[in-house]
Each structure stands twice: as structure tokens, then as C-alpha cells.
Image (spheres, grey):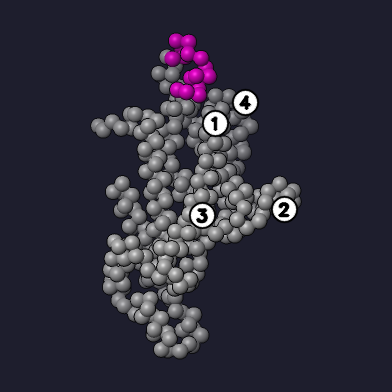
Amino acid sequence: MLAALLFVLLVSSGAFALIRLAPGDATSELFLARGDPAALAEARSRLGLDQPFLMHFGQFLTGLATFDFGQSAVFGRPVGDLVRERAAATARLAALALVLAAALGLPAGVLSASRPGFAALVAPVSLALVACPPIVAVLGLLLVAVQTGWLSTAPGSYAVPTLALALPVAAMLERLQAQATSEALASPDLVAAAARGVPRARLVWVHAARQSLRPVLGVAGAVVGSLFSGSLAVELVTSWPGLGRLLLDAVTGRDLFLVAGCALVGAMLIALGNLAADVVRAVVDPRVRDVP
């Protein structure tokens, strides 16, 4: 948990520092349009852009300590309210995609490891999906939806964005689960259990499946990270009102506090995903709880 807190702090602080030190700011358009100098000075003072970097950065850290994320220069609203609204939409989409990916990928991985014929059919599809960027996946699904009418393309519909995020993750889970299950089936304890007459189905779906979850859960952080990194392109293409679209608007508008707020919430969601995975690993495999 301490590592998660440090991770969130570093990500949000890094985002703030990068945007603050980069050329230009939220008042650049007003400056380029040769706006009223008094209005320009007032805007820079209101946003804290007329302060030295260290002083401005110190105010940002103080705001984090009191859960005050500042005011959005683009939307004119408190950053905390904006990121809460959009993060909830992204979290719903990511959670649904993760559940669908696990429901498809984990059983398919177990089947691939225990049935060579099934693996010969599934492995090429999984490799193709793993190599498929989310932007390609969502464009392909939109083409299928428009041509066939099988999926809704209305703004706010879950079908296309969920599948675009879930299918590459399901393919990655299938490959990881297949490898982990193969290694578990070849372990001495399962070989001995098979020699004692334990049914094949119980060996595969109970003992091997449980043992193989440990290495799969070990990459849960990468899975959660891929969902949030892929959601940017998916949300833009499907007009999903989530954190990815908000982050792009913030970066485009050089909205300093909004960029930092989006980065902070994204880091929090990734950290919570890692923490939940660690807890599940400890439940699934008690050996994880043993401290050497």
C-alpha cells in the first residue's frame, strides 16, 4: 500500500511538472490572438502561471494533501468533480472489459494447455489479437457493426468499446494461462496425483487451474495498465465520456491541474488493480503469504 501511494504521488507530480515546464500554457491562445494584456495577466495570475515553478509545485502538493486538485482552465470547474465523473465512466468500461476478458481468456487457456487440438485453433487467433492495437480493434469492430448491425454504435453504448478493450486482454490471458497450466500439469505434485488415480478433469480444472493463477495474477498490473492505456483511443473513437477523452482535452488545452488530476486518478485505479490482484493471489495460493 505504501508503494501504491508513492506510485500515485510520483505519477501525478510528474504529470504536473512536465506540463508546467513544457513550452506554452493554458493562456497561449489568448497571447497568440493578441488579447488584452490585462486579461492575459489576470488569467495567468488566477492559474498560478506567473509564479516560479517551485512555488507553484509546492502549492500543488499542498492541494493534494488536502484533496484540493485546483480549478480546470478549460472547463471552469473544480478538477475533483470532473475527474470523479469521468473516472467512474472509465472504471465501468474497464471493469466490464476485464470481467469479459477473464471469462473468455482463462478457460480458453486451460483448454489450450490440456487439449492440443483446441490449442491449434485458438493460439493463432490469440497471437493476432495480442498484436492488435486497441485503435485497430475498435475500428474493425465499428466496421463490423456498421456492415452487419450486430452491435450498437450509438454514443454511450457498451458493446463496441467493451469488446475492443476485452478481446486483446482475453488473448493475452489465454496465452499466459495456457503456459502456466502446462507448467502446472508437469509439476511433480500433479504428476504424482495423476499416478494415484485422480481424474483428469479434476487435475486440470481444480489443481492445475488454481496453481496456474499465481503467475497469471502476477501480471494483473500490466493488464489493468493496458486497459487504461487502450481506453484513450477507444474512448475517442466511440465517443465514450471517460477519463481518456478528458485527459486528451486537458493536454490539448494545456490544462495544468486537470492533466495532473487525470494522471492521479489513473494511477490510483492502476494501483488499486495491483493491490486487488495481490490479495487474490494470497487467497488463491497461501504460499504467497509466507515471508522468507
In what element is the residue under mark 1? helix
The answer to whether marks 4 and 2 mark residues whose Cβ atoms lie closer than 8 Å is no
Tag 3 or tag 4, which sits nearer the N-term?
3
Above or below residue 277? Residue 240 is below
Whole-number angstrom distance, CA of label 4 to CA of label 3: 40 Å
Q: Nearer the viewer, residue 78 or 9?
A: 78
Residue denoted by label 1:
107
Question: Which label sits in the foreground, 2 or 3?
Answer: 3
The answer to whether marks 2 and 3 mark residues whose Cβ atoms lie closer than 8 Å is no
In what element is the residue under mark 2? helix
Q: Which mark is residue 235?
A: none
Tag 2 or tag 1, which sits nearer the N-term?
1
Q: What amino acid type is highlighted by mark number 3?
A: Ala
Q: What amino acid type is highlighted by mark number 2?
A: Val
Tag 3 or tag 2, which sits nearer the N-term?
3
Tag 2 or tag 4, which sits nearer the N-term?
4
Whole-number angstrom distance, CA of label 2 to CA of label 3: 24 Å
The answer to whether marks 1 and 4 mark residues whose Cβ atoms lie closer than 8 Å is no
In what element is the residue under mark 3? helix
Residue denoted by label 3:
89
- Residue 133 visible somewhere in the drawing: no
Range shown magenta: 193-207
- Residue 199 visible somewhere in the drawing: yes
Residue denoted by label 2:
146
Question: Which label sits in the foreground, 4 or 3?
Answer: 3
- For this orientation, the residue located farthest to the left is 292
- For this orientation, the residue located farthest to the right is 147
Residue denoted by label 4:
117
Our reading of the magenta stretch's main secondary structure is helix
